């Protein structure tokens, strides 16, 4: 694999020697469902477009999963940081063997796309670009925020790499249409899903009339420098005829615009602007 560089009048191609696995928290500490992904990811699109797969992980409340996670963490402390014992399946490779297999695959196998696989990738990329272009045009008319993750030729190259990697896993010199299918499924569940997280209206532009009105009422209710309870503001919004969800959205919007600050784990709100 190679990367192309065109900076300061220097144009060259260099070998890429490593993979990057990165993780980051949203700008506001946790992911808000009513906000655009672009408002919560403090990265330029030129950086995001260089990742083959981007996953948006949300902390959803699930009693069964939460219980398993808590049990795992507690066991780590009970056993003094030692690895928790678990059952090993018969077809599971030990770490040493897996490392040797990966090194062998890298050294001896360099898959290339078959004609059928290349055609399928081409059709998929054109279809995705067409669909997103239509969605972006509609969003622009409605004054919505720009897409957080762009879909460009780099994503097509990412699909090629994922397809070839899938074939390399079984030491196959040819990446078939089935490999492309697996790559598309991974891409759809990661980067494409992240790219579609943009259904949120722009602040002060395409904000719905109801939300804009509620924001104005809350601003009039709380003077600059004054602090109020969040529950008090929500109760007042309900008295005005809005729903609790509308009130929550308006509060998040005001906090995101840095007009209000949260304290006491979000139970108190102070107007700062």
Image: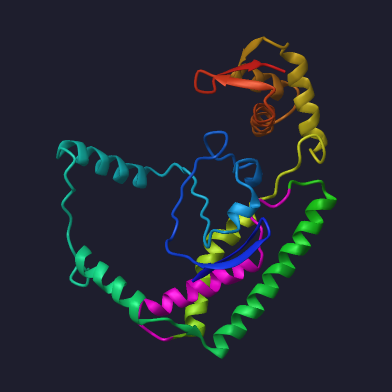
On screen, 63 above or below 272?
below
Residue 182 is situated, as x and y percent measured from the top left of the image, at 48, 74
At x 72%, y 67%, the residue is 131
At x 31%, y 44%, the residue is 69
Q: Does the stretch in magenta take in 12?
A: no
Decide if residue 182 is in sight here. no
Residue 120 is situated, as x and y percent measured from the top left of the image, at 60, 82
Residue 256 is situated, as x and y percent measured from the top left of the image, at 65, 31
Quadrant in which residue 67 is drawn: top left
- Quadrant of image for the C terminus: top right
Residue at the far front in the pictured view: 9
Residue at the far right in the pictured view: 141
Decide if residue 183 is in sight here. yes
Q: Which residues are magenta?
A: 146-173
> Total of numbered circles in the picture?
0
Front-most of 161 and 119? Answer: 161
Q: In the displayed structure, does residue 227 sit left or right of residue 179?
A: right
Residue 155 is situated, as x and y percent measured from the top left of the image, at 60, 66
Front-most of 145 and 11? Answer: 11
Quadrant in which residue 253 is drawn: top right
On screen, 244 above or below 143?
above
**Coloring scheme of the render?**
rainbow
Q: In the displayed structure, does residue 65 sit left or right of residue 195?
A: left
At x 73%, y 29%, the residue is 242
Residue at the far bottom in the pictured view: 115
Q: Does the stretch in magenta take in 151?
A: yes
Q: In the displayed structure, does residue 176 sit left or right of residue 237?
A: left
At x 78%, y 21%, the residue is 217
Front-most of 191 and 111? Answer: 111
């Amino acid at each position: 694999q190679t990367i192309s560089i065109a900076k300061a009048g220097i144009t060259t191609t260099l070998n890429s020697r490593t993979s990057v696995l990165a993780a980051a928290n949203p700008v506001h500490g946790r992911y808000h469902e009513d906000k655009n992904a672009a408002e919560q990811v403090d990265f330029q699109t030129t950086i995001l477009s260089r990742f083959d797969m981007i996953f948006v992980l949300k902390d959803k409340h699930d009693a069964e999963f939460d219980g398993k996670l808590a049990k795992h963490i507690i066991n780590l402390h009970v056993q003094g940081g030692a690895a928790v014992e678990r059952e090993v399946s018969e077809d599971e490779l030990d770490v040493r063997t897996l490392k040797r297999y990966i090194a062998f695959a890298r050294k001896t196998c360099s898959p290339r796309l078959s004609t059928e696989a290349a055609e399928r990738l081409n059709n998929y990329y054109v279809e995705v670009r067409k669909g997103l272009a239509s969605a972006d045009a509609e969003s622009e008319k409605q004054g919505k925020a720009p897409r957080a993750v762009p879909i460009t030729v780099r994503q097509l190259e990412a699909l090629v790499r994922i397809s070839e990697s899938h074939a390399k896993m079984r030491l196959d010199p040819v990446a078939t249409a089935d490999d492309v299918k697996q790559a598309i499924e991974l891409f759809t569940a990661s980067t494409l899903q992240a790219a579609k997280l943009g259904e949120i209206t722009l602040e002060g532009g395409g904000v719905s009339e109801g939300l804009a009105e509620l924001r104005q009422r809350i601003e009039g209710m709380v003077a600059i420098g004054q602090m109020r309870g969040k529950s008090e503001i929500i109760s007042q919004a309900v008295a005005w005829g809005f729903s609790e969800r509308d009130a929550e959205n308006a509060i998040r919007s005001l906090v995101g615009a840095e007009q209000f600050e949260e304290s006491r784990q979000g139970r108190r709100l102070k107007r700062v602007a």
